[in-house]
Amino acid sequence: GQSLEQPSEVTAVEGAIVQINCTYQTSGFYGLSWYQQHDGGAPTFLSYNALDGLEETGRFSSFLSRSDSYGYLLLQELQMKDSASYFCAVTPMEYGNKLVFGAGTILRVKS
Amino acid sequence: GAVVSQHPSWVICKSGTSVKIECRSLDFQATTMFWYRQFPKQSLMLMATSNEGSKATYEQGVEKDKFLINHASLTLSTLTVTSAHPEDSSFYICSARDLKGGVSYEQYFGPGTRLTVT
């Protein structure tokens, strides 16, 4: 099976950098994804790591270390609009189509 | 990016009635669509995988006779909540992956449907 753990809540100030961690236990997966969801809205894709290392997309970066069963999402130059829930998710090799989501991290950005 | 729509965006129904939710991929074809359920402040729980032209695959614990899924075309999947009860009240979200994706890592989500059963 698969399980992914994230902190339930993180608070940071505007302009700061915040890291949201995701540790996982899974039998095998294609890659680690990150999604953002604002209250009442649809999840939107942020980033994907198939290989170990850092992927950068503008203010957002994501990191994966398969040997440590660990990944993180890094948000730089935080803005108020970044206040949202962030989910890590894996695509298990056993079920190539599916996404299995972590519990999500609520990010609160303060001014 | 690819766009997925859902209809209706919200619905209130009486206990015992059935509700149909539509999920459409607007600018791409989706052989596979997914239906999720999300309770407030919780994660997305996959209910079923909807495959065009074949039966849906339900996750463990999801009643297939209660949550009827039909994937009639490459752009449309429907979820019908039959004989709805208050405990079925939730946020239902569909997603789809692009036909060209192979083992596509990106899923495109619809805006969700908030169902309230009174």
Image (cartoon, coloured by chain):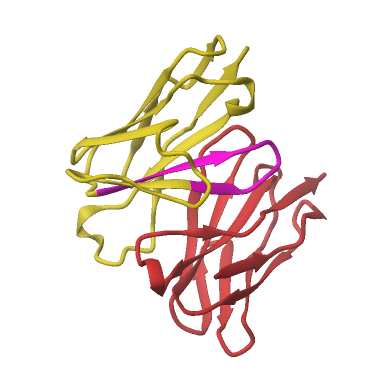
Chain colours: A red, B yellow
Look at 47% across and 37% down and name the residue there.
B93
Q: Main secondary structure of the magenta part?
A: strand
Q: Where the C terminus of chain A falls, by quadrant?
A: top right
Residue B8 lies in the magenta stretch: no
Percent coordinates x, y for residue A19 in the rendering: 71, 67
Q: Where is residue B60? Give x, y as percent.
A: 50, 52
- In the displayed structure, does residue B74 sit left or right of residue B82? left
Relative placement, left or right, of A60 versus B1 is right
Say above or below: A98 vs B24.
Answer: below
Residue B70, located in which quarter of the rendered image? top left
Q: Nearer the viewer, residue A53 or A57?
A: A53
* Quadrant in the picture for residue B91: top right
Q: Nearer the viewer, residue A44 or A100?
A: A100
Can you see residue B25? no
In this view, A106 is above or below A90? above
Magenta extent = B32-46
The picture places residue B40, in percent across and down from the top left corner, at 68, 36
Say above or below: A76 vs B15. Answer: below
Tell me the quadrant of the picture where the N terminus of chain A can be found.
bottom right
Q: With A81 as the anchor, is A101 left or right in this view?
A: left
Q: Position of residue A58 (x, y in %)?
A: 52, 62
Q: Magenta segment: does it hold B34? A: yes
* Rendered residue at 49%/63% (across/down): A47
- Identified at 38% across, 63% down, the residue is B105
Q: Residue B110 or B14: which is nearer the viewer?
A: B14
Farthest residue to the top: give it.
Answer: B14
